[in-house]
Image (tube, helix red, strand yellow):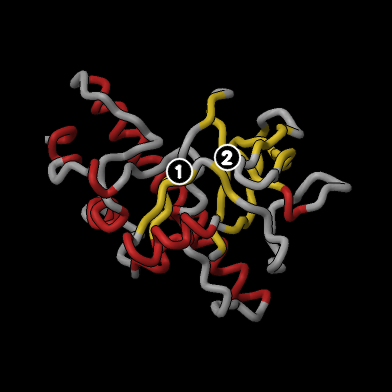
């Protein structure tokens, strides 16, 4: 399963694969910003299949599958031995992916004009998304309500529904279309499904 990631992390290489011992990874690069398409681990793919979401601390490079936007790996390394460890402020962090985040490789845009139109609309929605979430964060701060932009306490479906209530909203779109915008919102993330709050938006905005 392929997913998109945009954020900080570090490439690491397996340095021990002795039978009966846990694989040890040696960090090859300092944490840095990177965006691109990665592969979920087998365990994460099982979570997606049976739980509909997964929480990961690392991603795998696209070594068995080619993709035009595959994340760039360190030169001269055996990609089968690599993982990309996720970091935030130089501390290992995690990211939640749902089945909606898994990329559909059969979906293609064939003409340059279509790519241009889709790109403009997506980035327009991204700007609107950032504007509304920044306003939400300011409102939370004024009320003294904890606000973690990397773990918004709502589902993606609830977020889209909230955006659709905004005057002149550009989000009267299908959830699959919204996914394209959400994947570009590198400053924000969602909490695990078990941590969502049904009144997340109303508690802050009243």
Question: Dot 2 corresponds to which residue?
Answer: 7
Please tell me which residue is depicted at 56% across the width and 44% down the height of the picture.
Answer: 58
Furthest-front residue in view?
Answer: 20
Return the x and y of residue 164 as percentages of the image width and height: 26, 57
Q: Give residue 62's quadrant in the image.
A: bottom right
The answer to whether residue 155 is above or below residue 179 is: above
Q: Is residue 118 left or right of residue 164?
A: right
Are the residues at dot 1 and dot 2 in contact (C-beta closer than 8 Å)? yes
| Dot label at residue 95 | 1
Crowd rating for badge 1 (residues with CA inside 10 Å; few <14, some 14–19, many 20+): some
Q: Is residue 182 left or right of residue 105?
A: left
Q: Is residue 81 left or right of residue 50?
A: right
- Quadrant the C terminus occupies: top left
Front in this rendered view, residue 198 or 74:
74
Crowd rating for badge 2 (residues with CA inside 10 Å; few <14, some 14–19, many 20+): some
Front in this rendered view, residue 17 or 55:
17
């Amino acid at each position: 399963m392929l997913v998109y990631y945009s954020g900080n992390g570090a490439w690491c290489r397996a340095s021990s694969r002795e039978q009966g011992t846990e694989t040890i990874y040696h960090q090859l690069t300092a944490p840095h910003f990177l965006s691109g398409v990665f592969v979920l681990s087998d365990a994460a793919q099982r979570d997606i299949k049976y739980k509909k979401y997964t929480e990961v601390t690392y991603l795998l490079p696209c070594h068995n599958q080619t993709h035009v936007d595959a994340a760039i790996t360190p030169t001269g390394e055996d990609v089968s031995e690599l993982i990309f460890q996720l970091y935030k402020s130089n501390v290992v962090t995690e990211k939640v992916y749902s089945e909606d985040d898994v990329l559909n490789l059969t979906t293609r845009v064939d003409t340059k004009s279509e790519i241009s139109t889709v790109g403009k609309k997506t980035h327009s929605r991204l700007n609107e998304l950032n504007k509304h979430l920044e306003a939400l964060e300011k409102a939370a701060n004024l009320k003294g309500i904890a606000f973690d932009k990397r773990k918004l306490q709502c589902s993606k479906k609830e977020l889209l529904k909230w955006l659709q209530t905004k005057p002149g909203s550009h989000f009267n779109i299908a959830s699959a279309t919204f996914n394209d915008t959400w994947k570009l919102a590198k400053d924000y993330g969602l909490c695990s499904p078990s941590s969502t709050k049904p009144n997340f938006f109303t508690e802050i905005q009243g």
